[in-house]
Image (cartoon, coloured by chain):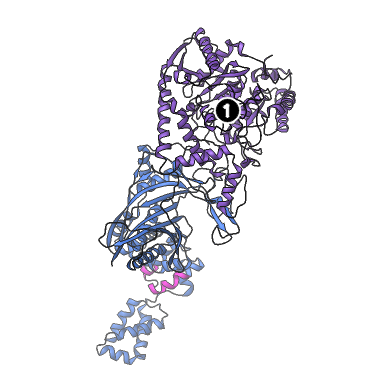
Chain colours: A purple, B blue
Amino acid sequence: MEPLTIHGLHDKLVKGELSAVELTKKFLAHKDAVEPRIQAFLSDNRQFALEAAAAVDKKISAGENIADLAGIPGAIKDNICIKGQQATCASKMLEHFKSPYNAAIIDKLMAADYVSLGKTNMDEFAMGSSTENSAFQITHNPWHADYVPGGSSGGSAAAVAANECVWALGSDTGGSIRQPAAYCGVVGIKPTYGLVSRYGLIAFASSLDQIGSFTHDVEDCAIVLNTITGHDVKDSTSIPQEPKDYKKSLVNDVMGMKIGIPKEFFGEGLDEACRKSLEEAMETYKQLGAEIVSVSMPHIKYGIAAYYIIAPAEASSNLARYDGVGFGLRVEGKDIVDMYQKTRSQGFGPEVRRRILLGTYVLSSGYYDAYYLRAMKVRTLIKQDYDEALKQCDILLTPTAPDTAFKIGQNDDNPLAMYLGDVCTVTLNLAGLPGISIPCGYKNGLPVGMQLIGKALDEETLLRAAYTFEQHRTDLRRPSPMGEVEL
Amino acid sequence: MKYESVIGLEVHVELKTKTKIFCGCSTEFGAEPNTHVCPICLGLPGVLPVLNKEVLHFAIKAGLALHCDILPFSKFDRKNYYYPDLPKNFQTSQFDLPICKGGYVDIEVNGEARRIHLTRIHMEEDAGKLVHSGATIDTSDSTCVDYNRTGVPLLEIVGEPELRSGEEARAYLEKLRAVLQYLGVSDCRLEEGSMRCDANISVRPVGSTTLGTKTEIKNINSFSGVQKGIEYEAVRQAQILDEGGTIQQATRGWEEAKGITVLQRIKEGDSDYRYFPEPDLIPIEVAPAYIEEVRGELPEMPDARRKRFMEELGLPEYDANLLTLEKQTADYFEAVVRDGADAKTASNWMLGEFAKKLNEEGLRADQAPVQPDRLAELLGLIAKGTISGKIAKTVLPEMWSSGKTAAAVVKEKGLVQITDTGALEEIVKKIIAANPQSVADYRAGKKKAIGFLVGQIMKETKGRANPGAVNELLTKNLQ
């Protein structure tokens, strides 16, 4: 049995085989059944979901055209603002914060009659790679309850993998979409920086953050991209360009495509089973007529170091606004400074505090040149490495993570080990390039992810390569351990 | 010991754009607290800034008028510090690549012309306004924040420490105000806070080339305060040095009412603002063609206008200086001249009776209830001999309060000048007859005695007698 997809369900809705309300109810029932085991959601939005679904049914019965995404149950990471709803960032700091405005992409989703079942769990303020840093709950990997779903968008990835919803949005600052997609065996895309408006995405690191999606397949990925991309005047870093129809990229053909294999991603530290799956994937591409070329990216090894300077630096400033003055948590103190200190000590969890300290340190006078400035130079070198590699080929193929999902609690006392796990994903954010993670194998029942990296604004080639792979490797399709939604 | 002062001013001016620097909220002054706010200027989670292009336009305009280099590539940076008037706890400002570098302001004090160089001009956002229940945030039970001002665009104009006296500092600040007002980019009201000035001052023995320890004077909200504050601080520092003491690097507040500066905060080295490039805004690239376009928009600047007033209208330098100090005054003056008044007469009135009325009511020239054409009409009546200048001085306040024209006031009050020599001669003869002693004195050679007789005639005519005719008739009848 195959998971229900946006494109499959859209056809059924349009043909009148089932109503959007029925569909939503079925997903809510399945979600109610599995959520106690997964704990992917931080809020339950069924009232809104059913109302939105009813509106879609009304359109269908009136003979109106509906958007591809209309009426298909989804979920939104809890760091994206929806008017009147919570946006906790999985932090005590924003536990009771309700956004008074919509993120730009929520306006776009509303125009497409989206249905969201709720906001999903995440690492606090998107800082983490396992969703264990949530102040509220641990999300479990649908493939094995003892394992993490990855992070920081672990709630969204797990929700899709467990069929609690058909699609979900996440954000990716250093791999927060691609890594959980890999761990949960779904398709996750981080678009080119500037392709999706960040207005209303609660910032972690502004120059790296990008909204993207989780779906069961590449076609659904194209549909969500069609809905959320586009220039936005409210985001100065949004790239002005004509809207594209990414469904046109769903071409089952990679003949002559040059796929680069950067050897630095395949060195020590890459799990052997994962390596094997990736080599099989290369073999698949070869058989389909693609050319596999070896490339070298000498500065990739500095990626983690640069990332863990730049991201915390920006975060230390972005998170300064959580001070107990205007909104969010306030813990009273004897004077203003005491109030600041108590609020921020009690409102933020240990990982957020660690990164704020790190970021504050690297921006301090006397350290700025040695850390931040040097990291920015490394960032430029990494960009140049990618430019050079992508001159020689159309896309790059790498692991999404060095290994499959790890056990809950495994990295509790070792934040550095956790950071090092981001080695395959962070450099894309530094370079602003698009990346997609798709399943390419299994190890002990846990999914292995393959990352494809494209040129800036060339999501088309990325989707095409991913789609072709997916069409030919039907052996990788496995039913969700949480069961499918029966219509 | 003899000391000299080294003074540099940091001036902030609010730009007169309709909307804030990074959002669409109104910049209007004086609205109900927290009514001109939105998620962006409140710094709510998830919001992003978008630069108001008019701010850049105004900044370039100011930079060109102040002879700065406009940087083709500049950027915004975040200045990080915690204070409750700053919702994001960082101020979006410009650090190492400001929009303008260099530039200068020419001033003249006591006949000496000096060129004061600028370090830079940069754009930034204003903070909100705190209202404490007590004196300071730490001694208050509660503090309220008004975010209306948060995000109002500011230019910070940093001058080189080339000023040598409070008088020069005042002239510099007045000149800056004039230029920015002429450009229409800022109101520059020190009292309302749309212009703010921090003065850095240190003193050193005359002849020394090393800089002394400086103090920063804040809270100056008048032009005289700038001058007096600096003069006070220079004396205070010199006294400390003469007594063998050392100057403490500190921020001091100017207390206008007491005329003193008081210690606010001791500075231990520079604050660490952890500046870094604002990742939410893209760098600013200014095309040379755009700079030229803005240059083309520059109006006549105060110096050029002053020169023109002297050369074309024949005004003395003193008059031209004062008239061009504020744009509204100069505009008003030119309108009066355009409406037919003689330039020097108009100037005398503008700087005399008219200025007096403005000062009394705390108004700017453009706010005067008497319009330029009305003032021109009044001056026309003097020129035609319908009324005397002295009478005119009583007509102006009447026009001011009643809104009537000069002609109407003159007619109503019967103030028309007596120029009819027949009627005047009668009075002259009467006065001569009534004052034999003065007449005798005059005839004995005490020519001054005629003044008394003129006074008597004026008294008799309630000031309406034409002074020229009176003199002529008196001289003739005393022969």
Magenta segment range? B380-397
Q: Is residue A111 left or right of residue A264?
A: right
- Residue A469 or residue A413, whichever sits in front: A413
Provide the residue designation for mark 1.
A228
Q: In this view, does B467 lie to the left or right of B124?
A: left
Quarter of the picture containing the C terminus of chain A is: top right
Q: Which chain letter matches label 1?
A: A
Q: In which quarter of the image is residue B385?
A: bottom left
> Measured from the top left, where is residue B308 in percent x and y?
30, 56
Answer yes or no: is residue B50 visible: no
For numbered disc 1, what is the local secondary structure?
Answer: helix
Q: Is residue B384 covered in magenta?
A: yes
Task: Provide the major secondary structure of the magenta segment.
Answer: helix
Local crowd size for mark 1, using a 10 Å CA cut-off: few (<14), some (14–19), many (≥20): many
Question: Which residue is rendered at x = 30% and y = 89% of the image?
Answer: B439
Q: Is residue B38 left or right of residue A257?
A: right
Q: Is residue B476 covered in magenta?
A: no
